Image (cartoon, rainbow, N blue to C red):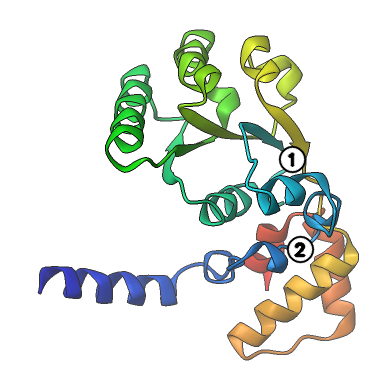
Amino acid sequence: MEDLFTAAARERLEARGPLADRLRPADLDSVLGQDHLLGEGAPLRALVDTDRLSSVILWGPPGTGKTTLARLLAQASAKEFVALSAVTATVKDIRSVTAAAEEALGQRGRGTILFLDEIHRFNKAQQDALLPAVETGLVVLIGATTENPAFEVNPPLMSRSTLFRLRPLDAPALGDLALRGLQAEGAVAREDALEHLFSTAGGDGRHLLTSL
């Protein structure tokens, strides 16, 4: 019964949560503004469609969908999924993930995807702790960063990862996102008001939805 109550409470919180969270895409086809990565025949989409996803670094400005994309990539695979923030995670956390990944592979035959948000916040020692598991393929790393990984991610980790750069959302993508937001809120907006929001959003989808 506790599980049922917990699930119901979570559903209510999600229903009242920020619009950006409520409108997270449910599949890769619903992701806006990243057709160069996810369109038909695009490089990242090809890796997913052929189940050949290996470690990747997602580099892009805030509000371009890095966290959402990481979760959808994991959803499209049969692997376990673990999410950590480099702001709070420690080397001990990395070792715990590695141990759990070994157990998942040994007992259930399932690989593990580790999503590490703000990977640039990890220092060299913390990044080095990731390397053995990434190098052997025990863990598929999806690192997200707003900073240039050439300067913020250790070269050995970069050499074992594929870099994908997310673009700021363009006007058509922002327009589609605004339409989703207005429909979800049961609201309407004047064209000039939307154009102002697009100009101030700066390609940041989260900023746009927060401003609606």
Q: Earlier in the sequence, mark 1 or mark 2?
A: 2
The residue tagged with tag 2: helix, strand or loop? loop
Report the side of 180 relative to 40 (left or right).
left
17 and 33: which is toward the camera = 33
Q: Is residue 69 above or below residue 186?
A: above
Could you tell me residue 20's position as x and y percent?
A: 59, 65
Q: State the separation of the CA atoms marked 1 and 2.
A: 14 Å
- Residue ID at (83%, 73%): 175
The image quarter containing residue 99 is top left
Q: Quadrant of residue 96?
A: top left
Numbered badge on residue 137: none
Q: Residue at the spot x=64%, y=11% of the render? A: 156
In this rendering, would 189 be left or right of 191? left
Q: Element at badge 1?
A: loop
In the picture shown, does residue 64 fall above or below 110?
Answer: below
- In this view, the residue in front, 94 or 14, is 94
Which residue is depicted at the point 55% across and 24% down? 121
**How dense is the environment of label 1, judged by Cα within 10 Å: few (below 14), some, or many (20 and up)?**
some
Q: Amino acid at mark 2?
A: Leu
Residue 149 to residue 14: above or below? above
In this view, the residue in front, 81 or 201, is: 81
Disc number for residue 60:
1
Residue 207: x and y, percent? 68, 59
Q: For the residue carrying disc 2, how many other residues have a C-alpha within 10 Å: few (<14), some (14-19), or many (20+)?
A: some
Quarter of the rendering containing residue 204? bottom right
Q: Which residue is mark 2?
A: 32
The spot of residue 101 in percent (x, y) is 36, 32
Q: Amino acid at mark 1?
A: Gly
Task: Look at the image and tell me in which quarter the C terminus lies.
Answer: bottom right
Q: How many marks?
A: 2
